[in-house]
Every structure is written in structure tokens, then in C-alpha cells.
Image (cartoon, helix red, strand yellow):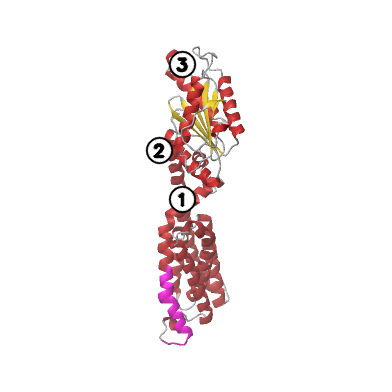
Amino acid sequence: MSRPGRPRVESFPDSPYAQELRTGFPRLHFAPDTEAEFERSHLRNARSRVRAWHSAVLAVLLFAILPGVLKATSGDPAGMFSAAWTSMNLGLLLAIVVAVTVCRAVLALIAWSPWFERLYPRVSFPLVSVCHGFWAFACGVEILGAHPEYIAPLVADAFAAFFFSGLLFRQAAVVTLVAASGFIVGGLYHSGSFAPMMAFGAHLFINMGLAAIAGYAHERSVRSQFLEHGVLSEMAARDGLTGLKNRRAFDEHLAMVWQQALRDRRSIGILMIDVDEFKHFNDCYGHQSGDRALQRIAEEVDAVSRRPLDLAARYGGEELAVILYDLPREHVIDIAQRLQERIQALGIEHRGSAAGVVTVSIGVAIVHPNLHRSPGGALQLADEALYGAKHAGRNRIHVLSSEFDARATDVLRAVRF
């Protein structure tokens, strides 16, 4: 039994979200398409934290640390770092602080820019690694020198890598390892031996381990919520009886591919499919038999819409619909013909049909979107084609003839193919 509030992943076995939930994503990674969608979602949700973290650290660097180091390197005894950083060459310290400040500035600017989702995934991992590695080196020198309290910012950085950087667990774990390496190199730079850093190193690495455990648990929770939301969205967009997309999802998808076809100058094929004499079938065999017949027909309809921009839907009652993106006219017609034959070949008994089995009528509209047409007009064409198929005797297809393809109006007549 599923826990309350959690979608049943058995509902739509073909859903990529349900498949990932069943496997439990042990490697903390999804299939490529789902992973890419998750990364975009994760980045959008983490943006406010990313902005706050990089901006706060940049402010400290610009208004406290960098001015102090500059004063110290110029020989100003009032410089806050002339006494504070006693164990490190100030020229090297200045180079590290400048490098970290530049990296943080780039990260903060991107976090506040309109190109965040496009640029941040490309630069965040290397730049955050540089920041944490160099800063851990500088702090490592001082921790083993005169200021052991500098271990505190390293612990904070470990947790920030997992919760505030916008990085996924694997990347954050690598950043933490880079920081640990920086600490070790800094300790060796100061003392030339591993022995002095053992106590501080143990404390730091325990906290880094705790940060990693918390980060792993957090990402598993975030990924689970993403998948559950995906399953719920799939359920909301599906017809409960046939498993096909519902009317709302169909309309939204048609509007989306219409814009893409308009931009790319591609065609859209629409099949409107109606089960012949279905009311008579229900009256004769019962509604449960009618439901089973629709389910079997829906399986055949769904099989012709396997490409990413194709879609099959239950448009209403016994009427189904298919969107076929960017296919040659002959291919669309061939799909309609084969679909009609496959449904008749199911051999679902129907004594009220002239064929003795359940058949369908299919209206086909093939449209090249332009500024004078609309998705609603394309549906009107497909409806008119379906009306022509039924008016001509059912169990056949009607499509728009080639002479109508160049017309711009939404109201066209369908002729028999």
C-alpha cells in the first residue's frame, strides 16, 4: 500500500518518473532526459539560496578581507591582517584572496543575471572548487599557526557546498574533497609534517562527512519530491480510462508544437478518430465492454505517437486524436490507413457494424502553420475531415486534398482521399 499523499507509481508504468521511483535511483542519478529536467528544476529552486550565499561571501571579501590584506601588504600597521595573518606570506595571501574574490564576483553576477539557468551550470563547479580549495589552503596555514579558530569557516564552507552552492551532491562532494586537499596542502606549507594537523584534520573531516551525509539525504528527498510531482502531473494530464493524454494536455501540446512549427516552418498532422456506432455498441454489449474496447483501441492509437513531439489523446467520449509533428503528407496518410486496419484487425465483435467488428473513421488534417492560421483552425479542419469520413459511410479516412494546402483560411472543406 502506498503511503498517504504519495502517487501510485503503478498507474502509468511507462512514465519515466514512475520508473525512477520504482528503481529508487540508487546511483542518485536519473535517465538522461529526466536528469536534465531535474537539474533545471533543481537550479530554479536553488537560485535564491545561491544568490544569498555568493552575495554574502562576496560582500565579506570586498569590504573586509580584501581591504585588510591590501593594507597589510602595503606595510600599514593598522591593517587588520598585519597581525591576524601571521603564518603566511602576505603576497601569496593577496593572490589567493584576489582569485577567490574574482571567482565569487563572477558567480554572484551570474546568479543575479537573466542567463542564470544557461550559464551557472557551466561555470559553478570549477569556480566553486577554486574558491573552496584556495580558501581551505589559506585557512589551513593559519589553523596550524596562530589562529586555530579559522577552522569555523571551513566547516561552514563544507555545508554551504551541499546546501547553498546550487551544485548536485556528486559535484558538492568533489568540492569538499578539493577543500580537504587544500587544507592538507596548507598544513604542509606551514609545518612540513602531517602530525600537527591530525587533531584539527579529524575535527574538520568529521564535519565534512556530516555535511556529505546531510547533503545526500537532502538530495534524495528533493529527487523523490521531483519524481512524485512528475507522476502527479502525468496523472493530471492523463485520461483515467485509456491512459492517453486528456483534452487539456492535447490542447496545450498542440499550442506548443504549433509555435515550434511556425518558427521552424514545419508541418503538423492531426488525426481525429471516432469509433463507429459506439453508442449502439454500448447498448448492445454494455458499458464495461465499451470501456475495454476503448482501452484496446487506445493502445493502437498510442503506438503511432512515440516520437517526442507526437501525442495521442482521448479527445472526448469515443473520440481520440493524434498530433504528428513534421512528417511528410504521404507518411501521415499511411499512418492513418495502418491505424484503421490495425483497429479493425483487433476483431472486437460488433453486430451493429457493417464489418461485424469495431471500426473507426479517421479525419486527417495536414497543416503548415502561418500567421493567418491558428491551432483552433487546424482542429476545425480535422473535425471537418472526420465529419466527411462518417458522412461517406464510416470505416474510412478523409484527408485534406493537396489543392487546399496553400490556402490561408481556417475554414476549409475536407474531401475524400
Q: Secondary structure at mark 1?
A: helix
Q: Which residue is mark 2?
A: 3
Q: Is residue 14 one of those drawn in magenta?
A: no
Query: Tag 3: residue type?
Result: Phe
Viewer-proximal residue among 309 and 245? 309
Q: Quadrant of residue 377?
A: top left
- Res. 280 visible in picture: yes
Decide which of tag 2 and tag 1 comes sooner along the chain. 2
Q: Nearer the viewer, residue 83 or 188?
A: 83
Q: Which residue is mark 3?
A: 281
The amino acid beneath tag 1 is Ser
Label 2 amino acid?
Answer: Arg
Residue at point 42%, 14% (across, down): 283
Magenta extent: 57-77
Residue linked to disc 1: 41
**What residue do we see at 43% from left, 56% from top?**
46
Q: Nearer the viewer, mark 2 or mark 3?
A: 3
